[in-house]
Amino acid sequence: MPRLFSVALPPWLTHALRAQRGPVPWNAVLRGALAAGPLLLAAVLAGRESVGVMAALGAMLAGINDRPGSRRTAVHRIGVPGLAGAAGLVVGTYAGEGLGAVPLTLTLTALGLLAGAVSAVGPVSSGAGTQLLVAAAIGAGMPLPEPGWQRALFFLAGCAWLIVLRLALPTPGALAHDFRFDGERVAVADVYDAIAELLAAAGGEQAGARRAALTAALDHAQDALAGPRLRRYASSSAERRLRAQYAAALPLAEAATALAWAGDALPARTAEGPRRLAVAVRTGEPCGPLPAPARSVPGLRALDDALLHAAETFDRGGKQTGGKQTGGKQAGGRQTGCERAGSRQTDGRNTDGRKSRSDKADDRHNAALHSDAGTNPLDRGARQTAHKGLRLRPLRVKALLRTVTGPGGREYGFRVALCYGASAAVAQALHHVHWYWLPATAVFLVKPDLGPLVSRVLNRAAGTVLGALVFAGFAAVLPRPEGLVALVAISGALIPVATRHFAAQTAVVTVLVLALVMVGGEPEASWSRIGETLLACAIVLIVGHLPAPGQRGGNVRARLDAATDAAHAYLTHVLSGADDRAARWALRREAYRKLAEARAAIDRAAAELPTLARHTEGTGEVAATLERLVDTTTACAVHLDDTGRLTPRHTERLATLLDELVEQRERAGLADPPADLLSA
C-alpha cells in the first residue's frame, strides 16, 4: 500500500532520538564493573562509607571519559579531568564551609566562567571543565565528614584505579600480540580499511561520506599514536612498527582522496591492496601479494608508489633502512614479503612510439627506489613522520589563551557561568538538602559538545525520570548496603554502553548516584532528584535562549576561521612547490581535522531550535566549500608530484572555489579569508 503522507521531524527532535551504534565494548564493561563497585565495597567493609562514596564518584566520572582508543590516550583523557575534579572538590569544600550563600554563589559563578571558557579548547578540556564544576558543587553541598583535601585524594584514588584497570587489563583477543598497543593497532588498521572503502566508493554518491570517514579514522589513529609518553620518541619495536605503518598510510590516503576527487569509478582490485594491509596490521602476519593498479593517471601512479612503499615498510617491520637489502630481500619492493601481484600497463607507449608519461614516471620511480632512500621524497617524508609525528604546529600557550578568550570561549564561558550560578542561587534559596544536584545537573545540560540544547534537555529529563523510577523499585526490595553496592557495580558496567545515548547515560548515572547517596547514609531521594533535574532543565532552557553580548554562534565561527587558516596553510605549501612530504601531510591532516571539528559544531548548531539555529545559517555551505577546496588541494599535490604542473581543470577549480568561499563567508556574516589565500 503506498504511503499517502510522511511526517518529517524537526532536526532538534531527530537529534534527541539518534543513538550511536557499534559492538559492545566488553573490555570497558569489565572495567566499569571492577571500578566503582569494588571501591565502595572495600570502604563499606572498613566502615568508611563516605570515603567509598568519594572514590566511587571519581571512578564513575572517569568511566564516562573511558572511550575507545590507546592506553596512553586514555591516561590523558581520564587523568586530566580527574585532576580538575579533585581541584574542584578542594575549592568547593572550603568555599562551602567558609562562605555564605551570596559569596558562595559568586565564587561558583566565577568558576563556571573559567571552566566554560577553557572547555572551548577541546574534548579533554571540556571534560576537565565539567568535572571541575560538578566536583565543586558536590564539595560545597554534600555533607561529608572528611576535609576537602582528603575528599580530593579519595576522588583521585577512584580515578587512578580506573586508569590502572585501563592499563593492566588486556583487550579480549589481543594477547597474541603486544596488548599494550592494541588500541593503536586497531586504529591504524581502521585507516587502511577506510582507504579501501574510499577507493571502492570513488565515482559514486558515497565518496564524500567515505572521505569523511577516512578523516575520522586518521584523526583517531593520530591521537592514539600521539598519546603522552615518558620519552619523546618511540622506544618499543612494536610502537615503531605501528608508527611506520601509520606513516605509510598517509600517501595512500592522499592518493585515494585525489582519485575520489577525479570522480571516476575504479576497478574493484584497486581497493584490495589497502584491505590486505589492514589485515596485516591486525594480525601481524605478512600481507601477501598486493595487486598493482594500472598506472594510467597521476592518481593511480601515486597509489601504486604508495602501495610499493607500504609493502617495503611492512616487510622490514617499520625499520627505516634506506635502500639497503633487508632480510635477504630487495628493498626495491619487487621481492618483499608483501610482494605485489598483477601487472602494469601492457605496453605503456603512445601511438608514435614515444614513452608515455606513466613510463617516465616509472623510470623516475624505479631510479628513486634503487638509489639512497634519503633522496626519495616519499620515503624521506614517511621516515620523518614516523619519527617525529604530525604535529607541525603544537598548541602553544598563546594559542590556548586566544581560544579561551576568543568568541567561542567567551560565549561558552558566559552561558556556563550564568546557568551554573543561577542554578546554585536557586538551589540554596530552596534550602534543599541535596541542593548541589541542581548546579551539577546544569553543568551537563549547558555543554554544547553533548548535543543541541533542546536535545540535551529532553534526554536529561527522560533519563532522570527513568533512572529514578528504576532505582525506587530496586531500593524497595534490595538489602542494604550489599544490594546497593551491587547496584553500583552493575551501573558502572553499563556506563560504557549507555554513553551511546545521552538519555541512557543519564538513566544509568542517576541509578548509580542515588545508590551512592543511600550508602552514604542519606534517605532515598528519587523524587527530589526528578524535581531538581526538571528545575535545572527549565533554568538552562531559559538561559540558553537569552540574548548575549557579542555575536551568537561564536564557537562555530571560531572553528570555521581555524579551518580556513589551516586550509590556507595547506594550499600555500602545495602551490609553493616544496618537496617536504612530511610537512605537507601534517598540514593536510591539520586542515581535515579542523574541518571535521567545524563540521561537528555546525551540525550541532543546525539541530537547535530555529531561534538559535538562525545564528549559524550559511556556515554549512562555507564548510562544504572548504572541504572541496582541501580535496582539490590534495589532487593538485598529487598531480604536481607526477607532472610538475597543474592542468587548467585544477587551476579553474581552485579559482572557482576561492570565489565561492568569499561569497559564502560574506553571506554567513564571517570575516574575509586571508588575502594571500585569495591570491593563491
Image (cartoon, grey):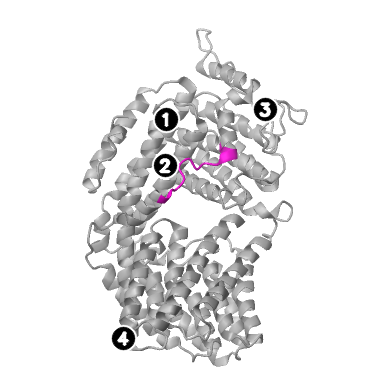
Amino acid of disc 4: Ala
Residue density around tag 4, few if under 14, some if 14–19, many if 20 or more, within 10 Å? few
Q: Do tag 1 and tag 2 residues touch (Cβ < 8 Å)?
A: no
- Of badges 3 and 1, nearer the viewer stands 1
Residue 333: image tag: 3
Q: Check if mark 3's residue and mark 1's residue have beta carbons within 8 Å.
A: no
Q: Residue 62 or 480: which is nearer the viewer? A: 62
Q: Which residues are magenta?
A: 385-397
The image shows residue 633 at horizontal and vertical percentages of 40, 33
Mark on residue 574? Answer: 1
Mark 2 or mark 3: name the one nearer the start of the chain.
Answer: 3
Magenta span includes 395: yes
The residue depicted at 55 percent of the width and 42 percent of the height is 389
Residue 2 lies in the magenta stretch: no
Give the alpha-carbon distance from disc 3 to disc 4, as whole Å.
75 Å
Label 2 near label 4: C-beta < 8 Å? no
Is any atom of residue 9 visible in this view?
Answer: no
Q: Secondary structure at mark 2?
A: helix
Q: Secondary structure at mark 1?
A: helix
Q: Residue at x 53, y 90 (%)?
A: 521
Q: Position of residue 588 (x, y in %)?
A: 45, 38
| Mark 2 residue type | Ala
Badge count: 4
Residue at 47% over, 76% down = 507
Q: CA distance from mark 3 to mark 1?
A: 28 Å
Mark linked to residue 591 = 2
Residue 429: which disc? 4
Say which label, 3 or 1, has the lower sequence index: 3
CA neighbours of label 1 inside 10 A, class few (<14), some (14 to 19), many (20+): many
Q: Quadrant of residue 4?
A: bottom left
